Amino acid sequence: MATALITGPATGIGRAFADKLALEGYDLVLVSRDEARLKEAAAELTRLHGVACEVLVADLTDRDDLARVEERFRTGPIEVLVNNAGFGQKKPFWANPVEVEEKQLDLLVRVVMRLTHAAVLPMIERGSGAVINVSSVAGFLQRGSYSAHKSWVTNFSAGLAVELHAKGVAVMALCPGFVHTEFHERMGMDKTIIPSFMWLDATDLVDAAWKDLMRGKAISIPSRRYKLLTAAARFTPRALIARVSTVGLDGRRRA
């Protein structure tokens, strides 16, 4: 049976990917720093879908822990990687300790780069495989370090998709907007300030993303409303974007 590795799989988008890939017939390697929730999710996924779930407890911002996860790609075939782990911050860049900003940079950029690199090398040798890097529509806006990190993820994934297509390896950036998960509560954000029509369901989001991956898309933007938003952002003056882009636009949790 094929195997998929997912970071941040206990809740939210990561959990929706775990359920989807299990339904698609994949065994799972689940990676998170929260051992209790990770084991709980693994047991539930096995019970619901009858798949094998391997648990890797790791803080991906720790170099040694990250190296252990990278090694997993060399010890057994991983057909699908979902880079989902992440966290946001409510305060602006200058109001956060630089160490926290650096940790976010590590998790959202450096970890994505290293795990993608570890994944695609054996995929290229086999001539098959897929990487889904969970980015954000925030990457199409100008709103601080989080936006900058997500812009990198989207551009990195789209460029790699072009380079690896001929080698049989698919790479896609998934760019969600507001998703009903724990992400915003962890930020301490008041969710009531966001209009109800802007919220997405994680399961619907992942179903649409999987279809986009199967169609060979390099960038997946869920729902017509977010497609329109990102298209409008390309032609909207930056000053106006800066006025309306004041909160996080993603639905993940830190691994």
Image (cartoon, grey):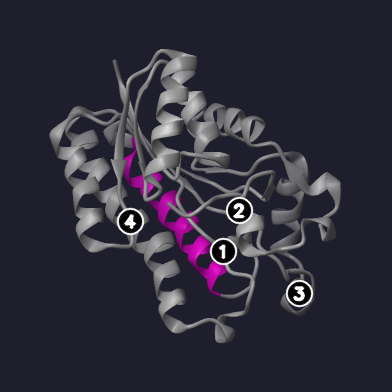
Q: Is residue 214 visible?
A: no
Q: Amino acid at mark 1?
A: Gly
User: Which numbered marker is on residue 183?
Assistant: 2
Residue 129 location, quadrant: top left
Q: Which residue is situated farthest in the front direction here?
A: 36
Residue on which the image places disc 1? 88
Marks counted in the figure total 4
Q: Nearer the viewer, mark 3 or mark 2?
A: 2
Magenta includes 249?
no
Q: Is residue 95 visible?
A: yes
Q: How far apart are the two marked residues, 3 and 4, measured between alpha carbons? A: 37 Å
Q: How far apart are the two marked residues, 1 and 3, measured between alpha carbons? A: 25 Å
Instruction: Indicate the position of residue 6 as horizontal and vertical percent values.
Output: 39, 38
Dot 3 or dot 2, earlier in sequence: 2
Dot 2 or dot 1, earlier in sequence: 1
Dot 2 or dot 4, earlier in sequence: 4
User: Which numbered marker is on residue 237?
Assistant: 3
- Residue at left 37%, top 44%? 35
Horizontal side, residue 209 vs residue 83: left or right: right
User: Which numbered marker is on residue 60?
Assistant: 4
The stretch of residues the image draws in magenta is 145-165
Q: Nearer the viewer, mark 3 or mark 4?
A: 4
Q: Are marks 2 and 1 in contact (CB under 8 Å)?
A: yes
Horizontal side, residue 106 vs residue 117: left or right: right
Q: How far apart are the two marked residues, 4 and 1, measured between alpha carbons? A: 15 Å
Q: Amino acid at mark 4?
A: Leu
